[in-house]
Each structure stands twice: as structure tokens, then as C-alpha cells.
Image (spheres, rainbow, N blue to C red):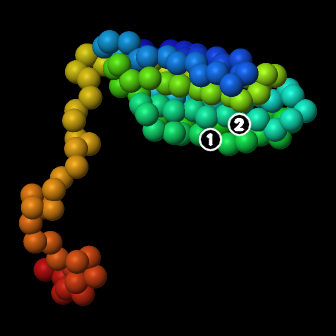
């Protein structure tokens, strides 16, 4: 059964915080919060597995909650957060699931030579139904 997990909390000042997904687990980032208690604008950056999922400046004395995310981090991948302000806080939370099989490597780039000759989509649309 999944349970909620706070992966990290970052207290700003231009620093990065990191959480590495443990062996045999899969992290699902569901929510991030960014609170800027400073009067100046500051930037928040959140990444999962090297991909940026949030990068925004936030005006002073405001906050934002980004929910209903479903960003997966696999075993060994980092979840990172950065905030540029001394009076800002970033939290990243979600589910930590058991994942004994791990990631299937279906993300490799396929060379055009492996795809072969493909009809352009517009030609497929002009065909008569079979």
C-alpha cells in the first residue's frame, strides 16, 4: 500500500536539496509547494531524474501549490529542489512505492533505419477504410 512521503524540504538561500530514490523503490511526485516570505521575488526549480518539472519566479510574500502531479523517479534517480531566496521554502512530496522489477528501458532513441519506410500521417487519413 502506498503512503505519503515528503521527499525533501529546501530552505532557500541559493542552495539545492536532493533526495535519491532508494533501491527497490519508485517515487511518484504528486505535489510541490513554494513559499516566498521575502519581499523580493525568488525562483524555485524542481527536477526529477534530471528533467525540470517546475521552474518559476515567485513574487515576494506569496506562495504556490502545484498538485495532481504524477512524475516518476526511478531507483537511483535524484529529486532536486532549489530556491534562490533566504526566506523561501520548497517542499516536494508524493508516494514511495515498492518496485522490485525497476524501470523498463523503453526510453532509448530509435534510429530512423530501424523504423523503416513509414507513410506520412496525412496519407493514412486519405485511405479508404478496410
Between the residue at mark 2 and the residue at mark 1, the CA separation in whole angstroms equals: 7 Å
Observer able to see residue 56: yes
Q: Is residue 68 above or below residue 125?
A: above
Query: Is 110 on the left-hand or right-hand side of 82?
Result: left
Q: Residue 2, percent across and down? A: 45, 17
Q: Secondary structure at mark 1?
A: strand
Q: Are marks 2 and 1 in contact (CB under 8 Å)?
A: yes
Q: Residue at the location (68% across, 42% down)?
A: 56
Pick the residue in front: 123 or 37.
Answer: 37
Dot 2 or dot 1: first in sequence order is: 2
Query: Is 66 on the left-hand or right-hand side of 63?
Result: left
Quadrant assignment for the C terminus? bottom left
Residue bearing mark 1: 55
Q: Secondary structure at mark 2?
A: strand
Query: Is 120 on the left-hand or right-hand side of 48?
Result: left
Q: Residue 16, percent across and down? A: 59, 22
Figure label count: 2
Residue bearing mark 2: 43
Quadrant assignment for the N terminus? top left
Which numbered circle lies on residue 96?
none
Q: Residue at the location (67% across, 34% down)?
A: 44
Observer able to see residue 98: no
Q: Residue 30, percent across and down? A: 55, 30
**Residue 35 falls in image quadrant:** top right
Q: Mark 2 Cα within 10 Å, few/some/many (few <14, many 20+)? A: some
Q: Residue at the location (26% across, 29% down)?
A: 103
Q: Residue at the location (18% across, 53% down)?
A: 110
Pick the residue in front: 38 or 71.
Answer: 38
Amino acid at each position: 500500500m502506498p503512503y505519503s512521503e515528503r521527499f525533501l524540504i529546501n530552505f532557500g538561500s541559493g542552495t539545492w536539496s536532493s533526495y535519491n530514490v532508494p533501491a527497490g523503490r519508485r517515487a511518484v511526485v504528486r505535489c510541490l509547494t513554494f513559499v516566498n516570505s521575502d519581499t523580493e521575488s525568488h525562483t524555485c526549480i524542481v527536477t526529477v531524474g534530471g528533467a525540470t518539472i517546475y521552474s518559476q519566479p515567485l513574487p515576494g510574500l506569496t506562495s504556490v501549490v502545484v498538485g495532481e502531479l504524477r512524475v516518476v523517479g526511478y531507483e537511483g534517480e535524484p529529486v532536486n529542489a532549489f530556491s534562490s531566496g533566504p526566506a523561501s521554502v520548497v517542499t516536494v512530496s508524493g508516494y514511495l512505492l515498492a518496485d522490485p522489477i525497476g524501470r523498463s528501458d523503453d526510453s532509448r532513441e530509435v534510429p530512423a533505419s530501424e523504423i523503416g519506410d513509414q507513410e506520412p500521417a496525412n496519407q493514412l487519413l486519405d485511405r479508404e477504410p478496410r
